[in-house]
Amino acid sequence: MVNIVCDPTFARVDKLINLLNRSKLLHILLILNLKQEPMRFSDIKRIVDSSSTTVTRRLGELEENGLVLRKSYSTIPVSVYYELTKEANNLAPTIQSMYDWVVEHDMELI
Amino acid sequence: MVNIVCDPTFARVDKLINLLNRSKLLHILLILNLKQEPMRFSDIKRIVDSSSTTVTRRLGELEENGLVLRKSYSTIPVSVYYELTKEANNLAPTIQSMYDWVVEHDMELI
DNA sequence: CCGAATCCTTTTTGATACTG
DNA sequence: CAGTATCAAAAAGGATTCGG
């Protein structure tokens, strides 16, 4: 029997959860998934209501992990758009299943 | 249209993810789910290979959130058993879907 | 055996100020 | 507009020690 506990894939699940846990990251994922079209930095920042530091960090991490695509245009001033990758969109059902779980077990998580 | 972004349920999804992100917690969940029977504190501690501080914290948080059941027996010395609740077992498919996602997109999460 | 208490380190966060 | 730099506070982690 395979020792599921030591399956290296679980280390990557850990990393995924760690990523999702960063502040505002899930929120960014959700609004981009909802929109399904590129969004500007300033709009994302306004909607998630956070500092530019935090938004920059989250978008950087998402891009670094292949979950968002950054497109920059040489307008003056520059405009930058972010959109989800296919991989990120494929994550939606997982997030939905977490959503369903907390709805079904209306427990007050601490 | 409902503003999905401000849906209060998402605050609880955040809490769930935050819980799952704690060190060793997912590991504890996995081994208990795999065993499907009560396990002793010392066995859990040995398998996840962590300090008693950490194991105690995680089991406390899991119990507090209705994910594990703690049963203590007045043997000498005392023996304490932990097992997953039905709610926790219902979380397995969600975790499985995260597993599937990281397998499918063999990205190296950072 | 099963923890609780203490204490110190590391990580994450976000406010503020600044720049091309 | 879209960030970077700095920095202090908060949260989380874990080693060690002690107790019923």
Image (cartoon, coloured by chain):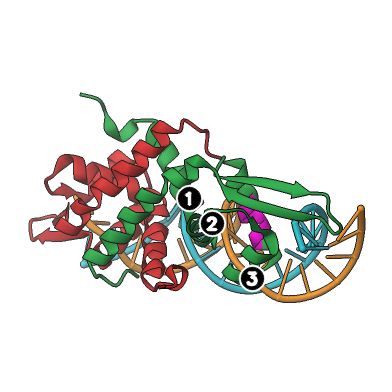
Chain colours: A red, B green, C cyan, D orange
The answer to whether residue C18 is left or right of residue B46 is: left
- State the image quarter where residue B55 is shown: bottom right
Secondary-structure class at tag 1: helix
Residue A85: in sight, yes or no? no
Q: Which residue is drawn at 25% across and 25% down?
A: B2
Residue C19 place in picture, x, y as percent: 29, 65
Spatial CA span between label 3 and label 2: 13 Å
Q: Which quadrant is the N terminus of chain A positioned in?
A: bottom left
- State the residue in front, B99 or B80: B80
Dot 2: chain letter: B
Query: Which residue matches tag 1?
Result: B18
Residue receiving disc 3: B46
What segment is highlighted magenta in the picture? B54-59
Q: Distance between the residues labelled 3 and 1?
A: 24 Å
In the image, residue A76 above or below residue D13: above
Residue A90 badge: none
